[in-house]
Image (cartoon, helix red, strand yellow):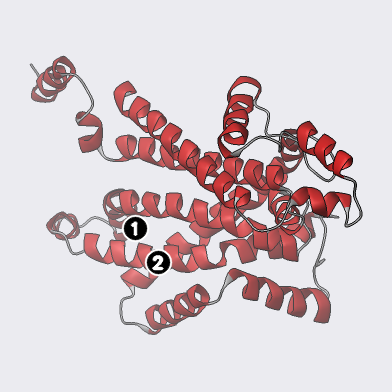
Amino acid sequence: MTKYILQRVLWVVPVMVGVIIIVFTISYFSPGDPLVVILGSDFSPGAYERMAKEYGLDKGYFGQLGDLFWNMITRFDLGRSYVTSIPVSAQIADRIPITMRLSLSAIVLMVAIGLPLGILSALKQYSLADVGLTTMSLILASIPSYVLALLAALVFGVMLRWVPVTGLASWKSWILPVICASGSGIATYTRMSRTTMLEVIRQDYIRTARAKGQKESVIVTKHALRNCMIPLTTIIGAQVAHIFSGSVIIETIFAIPGMGLYLMSGIQGRDYPIVTGCVSVICLLVCVVNMLVDVAYAFIDPRIKAQFISSKAKEKAIKTALGE
């Protein structure tokens, strides 16, 4: 088990290095000079050189990339904003709890709604409820998150005035962002739950359980649902990346002071340390969640865990099972 976890942890390193290099390269070769944006059109060459030296922009591509990795590894320093001179790591530390709360709430809502709806749709296959839920999930999956967010803000915030549209003044301010962030995830999770459940309930051991007279609720929860968990857990890991990346749009539309809004301000102002820092942290969060999903496989499916235990442990488990 330790070997399995260690392998997943080591995979995070090349992914993080690759993402940081790609983001830095795109920022470095993007047209426009961020220092010109900061200094304005009428700046002196001396002021330009001083600011370039202060932020390390007087070095070439490899020099700036080397400084970035060195500062990240040795001091966990993501650089300073070109506009405000505030350390990016300090700003992210203040904003990441908001983004985490939004994303985790969306994931919980996705599972809490999508799983029971998918099971209901599978158990009532070809019924009116199945057709309605399938149609609803297809429509919801086809609506982009920004369109859903704008429509929700217009209808429920502006026209009906049931909930606030911007800011985090109260708990009601979280309703629309969480629902809009989890919208496509609910649709995907509902369809995946339905497909997986339909495959499982047609297996021989399900027919045997029914022939023994077990209750349908016991069959679904104890036998069928447990064997559905691996693909459904995989969907959670995939949706985490989608929700974290979608938080940029959601936080911008609803003016939520999280990492998404901070990243958008960095993109608009060509403040590349903000862009690199936010993308790096989001990538790290996605890698950690996917690593936890991979580790969860070993607890859900004993066959996966058996691949990473020693031969002595396997022999002991076999003898225990045989009662020797």
Say which label, 2 or 1, has the lower sequence index: 2
Q: Amino acid at mark 1?
A: Ser
* 48 up-or-down from 128: above or below: above
* Residue ID for mark 1: 217
Disc marking residue 33: none
In x, y percent, where is residue 270?
73, 53
Residue 96 in which image quadrant = top right
* 40 up-or-down from 306: above or below: below
Picture residue at 39% right of the left edge, 29% below the top: 10
Residue 252 in which image quadrant = bottom right
Element at label 2: helix
* Residue ID for mark 2: 118
Nearer to us: label 2 or label 1 = 2
Q: Quadrant of the C terminus?
A: top left
Residues under labels 2 and 1: Cα distance?
Answer: 15 Å
Describe residue 303's horizontal placement relative to residue 6 as left or right: left
* 88 up-or-down from 204: above or below: above
In x, y percent, where is residue 309?
22, 23
In x, y percent, where is residue 229?
34, 50
Describe residue 249's horizontal placement relative to residue 194 as left or right: right
Q: Amino acid at mark 2?
A: Gly
Element at label 1: helix
Neighbours of disc 1 within 10 Å: few (<14), some (14-19), many (20+): few
Residue 300 in which image quadrant = top left
Describe residue 314's horizontal placement relative to residue 299 as left or right: left
Between 200 and 28, the one lying in front of the other is 28
The reply to whether dot 2 and dot 1 touch (C-beta < 8 Å) is no
Between 194 and 7, the one lying in front of the other is 7
In x, y percent, where is residue 108?
55, 52
Q: Quadrant of the N terminus?
A: top left
Describe residue 259's horizontal placement relative to residue 198 as left or right: right
